[in-house]
Each structure stands twice: as C-alpha cells, then as structure tokens.
Amino acid sequence: MNENMTTQANTDASGASPKSADTQTLTGRRSFLGWLLGIGTVTVGGLLSVPLVRFALHPLTDVTTETAWSDLGSVDELSTITAPKKVVITVNQVDGWRKVIQEKSVYVVKEGDGKLKVLTSICPHLGCSVRYDDGDKKFACPCHKGVFETDGKLVSGPPPRNLDELDSRIADGKLQVRYQSFRQLVPTKEVIA
Ligand code: FES
C-alpha cells in the first residue's frame, strides 16, 4: 500500500515521472551550453588565428620585389656605347625569411633613336645567363642555343619570348635600373620577384 502511494507521488498526470523530466531539462540545458561554448571557442580561435596565419604566409604572399634603384653609370658615358654594355649590380633580394645580397648582370642597350634601355641577362627559357657576342652582334644563350637581337628581340631557339627589359630611369645624370626577376617558360613577361 505504502509502496503504491510513493509510486503515485513520483508520477505526474501525463504518466511521466517529474524526476525524469527534470533530468531531461538539465541535460538539454547542458547540451545547449556545450554547443554555445563550442561555437564561442571556434569563433575566438578563428579570430586569434588570423594574424598567425597571415604571419606564417607572409613570405609566400608578399611580393619579394627589389624596389631599390641601382646606378649603372653616367648617362653621358653610356650614351657613347656602340654595343650592349654589361654592368654588374648588387641587389638585396628577399627569399622567404632570408635576405640575400646578390650580384646581377644587366645589359645597357642603346636603341636606334639614342635612347638607353636595360635588359636582364637571364634567359626567359630556363634562366641561364645570356652573353653578347660582338662578332655576331647577337645575344646568345649557352644552354639551349637561344639567340636574341641586340635590342633583345628573340631570333631563334626555345626561349618563349624576347629578353626582358627592366625598369630604368635617369636621376642626377645617372642611368638607374630596378632589378626584377621574371617567370620563365611563358610567352608573356610576368614579374615574380
Ligand atoms: S636557358 Fe636559354 S635557351 Fe634554354
């Protein structure tokens, strides 16, 4: 008899035990809080990771272009050249996290109208250094026999385009160049560093 009374007291009108309803509510609240906590953690983690990811990718996403201008010599002197003149410049290059100081060769060329321009010495095929042949009056690449005119125009061989012209300017009576590297094996000039 006592046992029956106790059982009736723990059972509501719908037949469900109030104790079990409380437990379900508590479990529901807990899972909601857990879900909320999870969303919060993911959001905060995502926000905090943005600067870290940008920091880690910096060398990959940043253009490592050498923007400094290098002197090539006096314009008056260079204007007297009768053939492409090779000049070696010192360039600071950023390679990932490393800063590298390298020597690069460029060619100063006088065009038909007397204007000076600067060509890279890097062959656009696979990156070998071209040399100017005074006898043939052509640039020649020793690796796969690429040949270019004095003004850099492709004559023959596997290179996919002309020799690349570098940005140049005149400042204080001096010809200056901004050294850049370009993608190889493509028909159009694309700066890569
Ligand atoms: S690297 Fe110059 S022709 Fe191949």
Image (cartoon, rainbow, N blue to C red):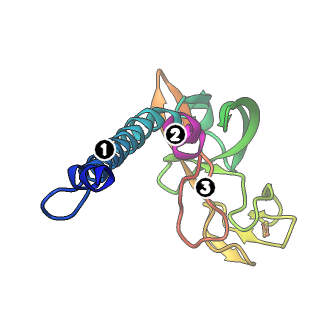
Is residue 53 found inside the magenta-colored segment of the image?
no
Of 7 and 191, nearer the camera is 7
**Residue picked out by circle 2:** 53
Q: Position of residue 109 (x, y in %)?
A: 61, 49
Q: Residue at x 61, y 55 (%)?
A: 182
- Observer-side mark, 2 or 1, equals 1
Q: Amino acid at mark 3?
A: Phe
Q: Amino acid at mark 2?
A: Val
Q: Residue at x 49, y 38 (%)?
A: 54
**Regarding mark 3 in the picture, which secondary structure is present there?**
loop
Horizontally, residue 172 falls left or right of residue 99, namely left
**Regarding mark 1 in the picture, which secondary structure is present there?**
helix
Q: Residue at x 29, y 54 (%)?
A: 1
**Residue picked out by circle 1:** 26
Look at the image and tell me whether residue 178 can be seen: no
Please identify the quarter of the rendering in which residue 26 is found: top left
- Observer-side mark, 3 or 1, equals 1
Which residue is at the far right?
142
Q: Position of residue 129 (x, y in %)?
A: 79, 55
Q: Amino acid at mark 1?
A: Leu
**Regarding mark 2 in the picture, which secondary structure is present there?**
helix
Which residue is at the far top?
172
Spatial distance from mark 3 to mark 2, Cα to Cα? Answer: 27 Å
Q: Position of residue 35 (x, y in %)?
A: 35, 47
Of 170 and 26, nearer the camera is 26
Q: Decide: marks 2, 1 in contact (CB < 8 A)?
A: no
